[in-house]
Image (cartoon, grey):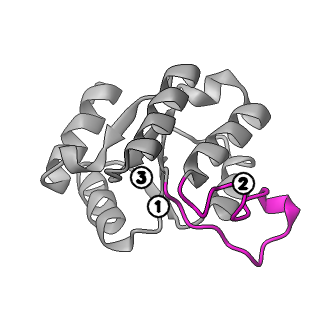
Amino acid sequence: MIYFIDEDIGQAEAWCFSLRTAGFETEQIRDANSAYRTLSSVDNVELVFIDVMLAVNDSVGSDGGDYNRKRTEDNMITGLCLLDDLSAKLGPQFLKKCILLSCTGKDRVLSRIRAKSNELKVPFWPKFDFQEPRDFTDKVKEILNK
């Protein structure tokens, strides 16, 4: 299963549709709290794409992770917080299945993404590198050798 954690419904749907057309199973998750709960309890993870500027569900309690506005810097680094939490809970093997995504052009956020990517050895794919959903799918196929 390829998990796609992003509230950007239009782009996420297009990329997931392209992946499913290529024979992959996908599941979309639209907020950090739900992603933490789901990924903490599944064992069928092939890849996990995590959008850095990810929404949170303020109505979720502590069992869904602690993703408040202060910690996530007003949702600017929510995906990085989620990645840290999943790493702590699921270990370094899980990180080998993760890829960070973002379309930010903000230097401050980009530097945080690159630092976390280097620290945890998790690839970062800028969203604007993919002109078409098929480009995204081709890169996924390449890394999964399919």
Residue located beneath label 2 in the image: 71
Residue located beneath label 3 in the image: 25
Distance (Cα) linking label 2 and label 3: 32 Å
Tell me where residue 94 appears, x and y as whole percent. 62, 30
State the extent of the magenta-drawn residues as a range. Answer: 53-76
Q: Going 58% across and 61% down the picture, which residue do you hit? A: 75
Asked if residue 22 lies left or right of residue 45, the reply is left
- Work out whether mark 1 precedes mark 2 in sequence or the reverse, and give the earlier one: 1
The local secondary structure at tag 3 comes to loop
Q: Give the numbered dot on residue 6.
A: 1
Which residue is nearer to you in this view: 70 or 66? 70
Tell me where residue 83 appears, x and y as whole percent. 62, 41
Residue farthest along the bottom direction in this orientation? 59
Q: Give the numbered dot on residue 136.
A: none
Q: Quadrant for the C terminus, please.
A: top left
Tell me where residue 42 appears, x and y as whole percent. 68, 47
**Res. 21 image quadrant:** bottom left
Q: Going 79% across and 57% down the picture, which residue do you hit? A: 66
Asked if residue 70 lies left or right of residue 83, the reply is right
